[in-house]
Amino acid sequence: MANTYRNIDADKLNELAETYCDECIDAIKQIATNSGKVLDVKERHLPTIDYFLKHWLRRKHNEFWQTNLKSSQWYNAQSDSAHPLSDTIKGITSDFHALSKDIVANEGKGIFYAKNALGMTDRTEQTIKGEIPPFNPFNLDVPEDNGTS
């Protein structure tokens, strides 16, 4: 029997999360051209927990949404390893983040989401070991500074 909690079937929740990710991957944006023609352009959407819980489930699977799977339940289950849906919710959250990172990395979308929700940064740290030689682009013989100048 599937793991359930407050009428929430873990297998069904996983199935719905996968469907949501598939819809995010297959998303289409319509763009009008100068000639007035409308083109369908593939544009993946970043999957987010809040949209999934508050809107997608309500619009696409209202009967499941009515089980009152709220954001607070989601985050409580995620942080409580004893919660019966903990592993399921951690796995779904990980899947959402993996897809989001791929979209950010390959399409340059959602930079603020990447920084805030995914913990990504736009800074690189560089560690230089040893002494840095003086800048000498023309490879000229430059006398060493012996401190007398």
Image (cartoon, rainbow, N blue to C red):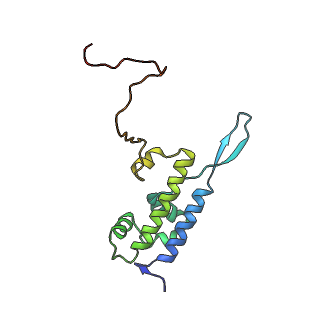
Residue found at x 52% / y 67%: 17
Horizontally, residue 31 falls left or right of residue 132, namely right
Hey, which residue is sitting farthest left in the picture?
A: 148
Horizontally, residue 32 falls left or right of residue 63, namely right
From what the image shows, is residue 90 above or below residue 134? below
Quarter of the rendering occupied by the C terminus: top left
Q: Quadrant of residue 61?
A: bottom right
From what the image shows, is residue 82 above or below residue 78? below
Q: Position of residue 33 (x, y in %)?
A: 70, 37
Residue 46 visible from this viewpoint? no
Q: Between residue 62 and residue 70, name the one nearer to us.
A: 70
Q: Between residue 132 and residue 9, name the one nearer to us.
A: 132
From what the image shows, is residue 136 above or below residue 69? above
Q: Position of residue 109 (x, y in %)?
A: 52, 45
Q: Position of residue 115 (x, y in %)?
A: 41, 47
Residue found at x 61% / y 49%: 43
Q: Position of residue 98 (x, y in %)?
A: 50, 58
Residue found at x 50% / y 53%: 101
Horizontally, residue 147 falls left or right of residue 70, namely left
Hey, which residue is sitting farthest bottom in the picture?
A: 1
Residue 72 visible from this viewpoint? yes
